[in-house]
C-alpha cells in the first residue's frame, strides 16, 4: 500500500486522522451509540470486544490502514484503506462506521468523496467497496457515490455472531469518478 495514500485528510469540519491511541476512548463512545448495528458487521466493537478490535487496527498491519473520523474535532467513527487487488492499482474503502446522528446528513458522502478524490489523485485506478448483502443502507450509499455492483460473493465470511455473510462487491473506476457531473 502506498504510504502517500495513508495520510491526514480534511474537508472543513470533517477530518480523517491515522488511527492512534489518542482516539481509543472517542471511538469507543462513538461505537457505543449504535448497539444494534454490530450484528451486521464482521467484527464487534462493543463491550469487551472493543479493545482487541481497536488494538488490531492499531497494529498497523500493512493490509489495513485505519482512520479515526472526526467532526468538529470529535471522534464520530472510523474507516480504512484495505488492500485489494494489485498494489498501486486498486484499493478497498472499508471498516467504516459513522455515529447514528450523522447518518442521512450527507457526512458519509463527504467522507467517501474525500477518500475517493485522494485515492485517484494518488494514481489508483479502482476503488472497491464490500458491503454485507443485508446492509441495504450502505449499499444505497455506495450506489449514490456511483459505485457499480460487480456481483455477490456468496458465503464470503463468517461474522463474529456466527452468521454466514454474503458480500456485495462494488467498484468505482478512475474514469468513472472523473466523468461524474
Image (spheres, grey):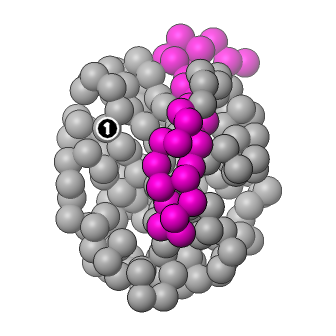
Q: Tell me which residue sits at (23%, 37%) in the image.
A: 1
Local packing at callout 1 (Cα closer than 10 Å; few below 14, some 14-19, many 20+) is: some
Looking at the image, residue 55 sits to the left or right of residue 117; the answer is left
Residue 51: x and y in percent read 35, 82
Position of the C terminus by quadrant: top right
Stretch of the chain drawn in magenta: 153-181
Q: Tell me which residue sits at (39%, 59%) in the image.
A: 67
- Camera-side residue: 78 or 154? 154
Picture quadrant where residue 97 is located: bottom right
Looking at the image, residue 54 sits to the left or right of residue 144; the answer is left
Looking at the image, residue 59 sits to the left or right of residue 16; the answer is left
Residue 121: x and y in percent read 40, 26
Q: Tell me which residue sits at (42%, 88%) in the image.
A: 48
- Camera-side residue: 118 or 135? 135
Looking at the image, residue 169 sits to the left or right of residue 58; the answer is right
What residue would you read off at disc 1? 83
Amino acid at each position: 500500500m502506498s504510504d502517500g495514500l495513508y495520510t491526514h485528510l480534511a474537508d472543513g469540519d470533517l477530518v480523517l486522522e491515522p488511527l492512534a491511541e489518542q482516539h481509543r476512548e472517542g471511538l469507543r463512545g462513538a461505537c457505543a451509540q449504535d448497539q444494534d448495528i454490530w450484528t451486521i458487521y464482521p467484527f464487534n466493537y462493543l463491550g469487551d470486544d472493543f479493545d482487541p478490535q481497536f488494538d488490531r487496527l492499531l497494529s498497523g498491519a500493512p493490509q489495513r490502514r485505519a482512520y479515526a473520523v472526526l467532526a468538529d474535532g470529535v471522534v464520530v467513527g472510523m474507516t480504512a484503506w484495505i488492500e485489494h487487488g494489485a498494489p498501486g492499482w486498486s484499493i478497498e474503502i472499508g471498516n467504516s462506521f459513522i455515529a447514528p446522528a450523522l447518518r442521512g446528513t450527507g457526512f458519509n458522502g463527504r467522507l467517501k468523496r474525500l477518500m475517493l478524490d485522494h485515492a485517484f489523485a494518488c494514481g489508483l485506478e479502482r476503488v472497491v467497496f464490500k458491503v454485507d448483502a443485508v446492509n441495504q443502507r450502505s449499499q444505497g450509499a455506495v450506489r449514490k457515490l456511483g459505485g457499480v455492483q460487480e456481483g455477490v460473493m456468496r458465503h464470503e465470511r463468517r461474522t463474529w455472531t456466527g452468521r454466514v455473510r454474503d458480500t456485495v462487491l462494488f467498484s468505482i473506476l478512475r474514469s468513472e469518478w472523473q466523468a461524474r457531473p
